[in-house]
Amino acid sequence: MGPDKSPVSEEERKSHRPLYANQTVSSLSNGLAMPFIPFYVARLGATTTELGWLQAFRNLFPNVMQLPWGSLSDRLKARIPFLILGGWISSVLFLFIAFSVSPFILILLVAVQSFAISMMIPTWSALLGEMVSKGHRGYVFSRIVMVSVAAALIGNVLAGILIILAAPEAPEATWVYQYPFIAAMVLGILATVFLFRVPAKRPKKEEEEKVTEEEEWERRRDFRHLITFQLFYMFFMSMLWPLMPRTTVDIVHADNLEIVLLTVIGSVSVLAVQTRIGRLQDRVGPGVLIKLSRFMLVPVPLIYAFASEMWHLYVLNIFAGAAIAIIYISFTTYLLDVAPASKTARYFAIFNAAVGIVTFVGSVSAGFLADHFTSIYNLWTGLFIVYMVSTVGRLIGSVLFLKLKPSKRYPETMTDVLPRISKLLHLSR
């Protein structure tokens, strides 16, 4: 992939420092808490239906509410106030989550927290679009993701230490999760301080390219195709989410340490390939990588369906981490390529809102279906049926993505990328 020399100017790199700092501390906060919320709810005795509602709210509110926030941010030409307010509210709610005593109360708190997060997602994406030059997006985004995932990984480890040391004699205790949740609140508030240092004057970048009416129509077509294909795929992808904690806790019988290790392994896998994927994207574009990520995630529900030991899930997380590393940067870059500069936050809001609605329906449907089938058969068979539905749907959705057009011209093509992917996988072993 060549030497790891920064192609970004010194002026632009300086302007990015508050963004890196914010994402580092914010991700450390999220790493302490976010991955463990579903397992915390499962430990509180949640049913598969309740876990479905939990995942549904975590997908619906952060996405649907982006529409008004994204439009308002574009209209006011303001990004930082939305990020700070959303960060404060979502962080404080970790304190209330820590002391929840029932799945119902916790799910309500997560719904409110998701509402606060919704004002941050489109404004963060739009801010990145304003501050990062087009030709360097893969490079910069991959490094922001890299520090974020590294910080989240540290958070996972710290959470594991807190959970295990709090009750070494009770590996399945529930109350031990309170400690990382409280720490997440403090760090989440601290992360917003760095946003005050984002320069009001954005770095000077290239002028927005002028596009013909035909090119504008093609961009709108590409945006519609991306939404259509992603909605189909995400419905079946989201069916997996409420089932995973049940398999992990009730079938594989993972203890708290094994749950922490599962999260850590996934984060390490993302880190191992993230920067190489960023450079690869700057050469071939996000479209190729989006297609690759869709096919890579097809086997995930199939493996969960047959998992009986933790090492099965560990191996799966290593493989899935590479696909997740692609997702972190490719969809953002594709949307920035096709969105008009004056409507960036709105485009992200529309896309994410549509995905949020579909994943809400997918998660709730999976929860109800799993409970229905487990009431007729046993737990393993009930979950197995829903896993198979998810697998088939993902496969069909991956085929649909083959029709996705490149977002713009990039130096290399699909033919060029195949040997690079082989080299990437080899280097990440």
Image: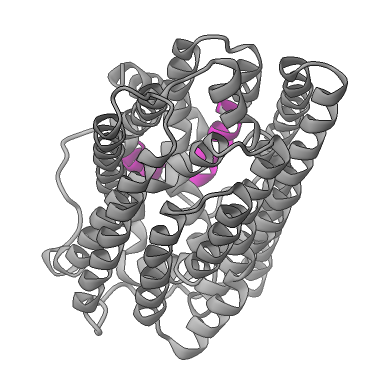
State the quadrant of the N terminus. top left
Looking at the rendered image, the quarter that the C terminus falls into is top left
Within the magenta stretch, is there residue 283?
yes
Residue 375 figure quarter: top right
Q: Nearer the viewer, residue 278 or 213?
A: 278
State the image coordinates of residue 341 (x, y, percent, origin top left). Answer: 48, 75
Residue 73 pos. (x, y %): 48, 82
Question: Which residues fall within the magenta stretch?
Answer: 277-296
The answer, for residue 236, to whether it is visible in the render is no
Residue positioned 49% across, 75% down in the render: 210
Residue at 25% in and 59% down: 187
Residue 87, position as x, y percentages in the image: 37, 68
Q: Is residue 318 above or below residue 57?
A: above
Classify 200 as above or below 383.
Answer: below
The answer to whether residue 123 is left or right of residue 41 is: left
User: Which is more toward the observer, 54 or 429?
Assistant: 54
The image shows residue 300, relative to residue 141, as above or below, that is: above
Please name the predominant secondary structure of the magenta segment in the image: helix
State the residue at coordinates (50%, 63%).
113
Where is residue 164 shown, x and y percent of the image?
A: 29, 29
- Asked if the stretch drawn in magenta spans residue 81, the answer is no
Q: Quadrant of residue 107?
A: bottom right
